[in-house]
């Protein structure tokens, strides 16, 4: 992953990102020598979101198959909550 120094952003503006992101679509912005932020291309962001959503679907399906999902109606759920009070 590439690195962009915060001072380069001040000096070069948005063009400082172009070189850094061309390698793999991600770059770390350092401030005073420490990584503080990550920037990425919109394509890389889309890949990340798709991966996160795919994982969420996988986890939800596993919960459903393991019986950890309650598929009662809202009225049934509200009745159960009121009984527990």
Image: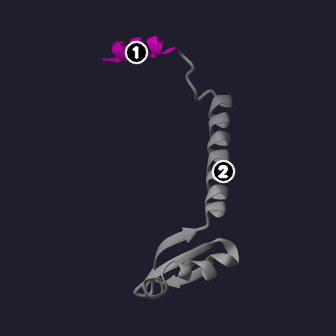
- The majority secondary structure of the magenta stretch comes to helix
Picture coordinates of residue 11 (x, y %)?
45, 88
Q: Which residue was labeled with disc 1?
A: 78
Give the color scheme: rainbow, by chain, secondary structure or one colour: one colour
Residue range of the region highlighted in magenta in the rendering: 73-85
Residue 83: image quadrant is top left
Above or below: residue 5 compared with residue 68: below
Q: Residues within 10 Å of mark 1 (few under 14, many from 20)?
A: few
Question: Quadrant of the image for the N terminus?
Answer: bottom right
Above or below: residue 55 compared with residue 3: above
Residue 10: mark: none
Residue 43: image quadrant is bottom right
Residue 50: mark: 2
Relative to the observer, which residue lies in front, 37 or 58?
Answer: 37
Question: Quadrant of the image for the C terminus?
Answer: top left
Above or below: residue 67 compared with residue 44: above
Q: Residue at x 55, y 22 (%)?
A: 70
Q: Is residue 27 left or right of residue 29?
A: right
Picture coordinates of residue 82 (x, y %)?
34, 14
> How far is the residue under mark 1 from the one under mark 2?
34 Å
Relative to the observer, which residue lies in front, 16 or 30?
Answer: 16
First of labels 1, 2 by sequence position: 2
Residue 63: image quadrant is top right
Residue 16: in magenta span: no
Q: Residues within 10 Å of mark 2 (few under 14, many from 20)?
A: few
Q: Residue at x 58, y 76 (%)?
A: 27
Q: Is residue 60 left or right of residue 76?
A: right
Q: Residue at x 40, y 15 (%)?
A: 78
């Amino acid at each position: 992953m590439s690195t962009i120094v915060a001072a380069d952003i001040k000096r070069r503006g948005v063009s400082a990102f172009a070189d850094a992101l061309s390698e793999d679509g991600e770059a770390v912005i350092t401030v005073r020598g420490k990584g503080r932020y990550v920037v990425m291309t919109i394509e890389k962001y889309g890949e990340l979101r798709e991966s996160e959503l795919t994982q969420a679907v996988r986890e939800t399906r596993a919960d459903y198959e393991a019986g950890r999902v309650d598929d009662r109606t809202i009225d049934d759920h509200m009745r159960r909550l009121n009984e527990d009070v």
